[in-house]
Image (spheres, rainbow, N blue to C red):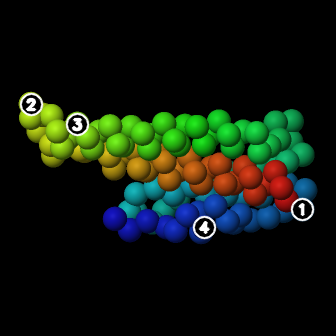
Amino acid sequence: MNMKPENVAITPANTQSTGGSEHALWIGGGGDSVLTFTLDKTSGFPPNTDQCAHLNQMIQGLARAVKDVMFRAENDVHTDSEFASQPIVDIVDAIIMLSQLSEAVRVEAQS
């Protein structure tokens, strides 16, 4: 799986003095960003680091889900382990994307 490094994905791609900064989210092996967006700390809904706590709770919940899926795939004799472990890739992509979003919020809120 070829994935952009997280520090590349969260580095502002285009910083504008009055228009905030542009960020890109990456998942999977395609090498293309899934979503490019602009965060502006002076907008009507400015990013703040309090929002990162909610994102980080979601990330932790997804990490616990991976552990649960792995446990079931390895220990449930009535389940096909290959089939049961397939959601792990999707959960990992979600973890990466949410962590990139959380870091983008932090970067813009502190700039």
> Which numbered disc covers residue 72?
3
> Which numbered disc covers residue 17?
1
**Tag 3 near tag 4, CB within 8 Å:** no
Q: Residue flagged by tag 3: what amino acid is it?
A: Arg
Q: CA distance from mark 3 to mark 4?
A: 32 Å
**Horizontal relation, residue 95 to residue 30: left or right:** right
Quadrant housing the C terminus? bottom right
Residue 27 vertical placement versus 88 (above, below): below
Mark 3 is surrounded, within 10 Å at the Cα level, by few (under 14), some (14 to 19) or many (20 or more) other residues, namely some
Q: Residue at x 23, y 36 (%)?
A: 72
Q: Secondary structure at mark 3?
A: helix
Q: Residue flagged by tag 4: what amino acid is it?
A: Asn
Mark 2 is surrounded, within 10 Å at the Cα level, by few (under 14), some (14 to 19) or many (20 or more) other residues, namely few
Residue that carries the numbered disc 2 in the rendered image: 78
**Horizontal relation, residue 96 to residue 86: left or right:** right
> Which numbered disc covers residue 7?
4
Of marks 2 and 3, which one's residue comes earlier in the chain?
3
Residue 48 vertical placement versus 34 (above, below): above
Of marks 3 and 4, which one's residue comes earlier in the chain?
4
- Select label 1 or label 3 by which is in front: 3
* Total marks in image: 4
Mark 1 is surrounded, within 10 Å at the Cα level, by few (under 14), some (14 to 19) or many (20 or more) other residues, namely few
Of marks 2 and 1, which one's residue comes earlier in the chain?
1
- Select label 2 or label 4 by which is in front: 2
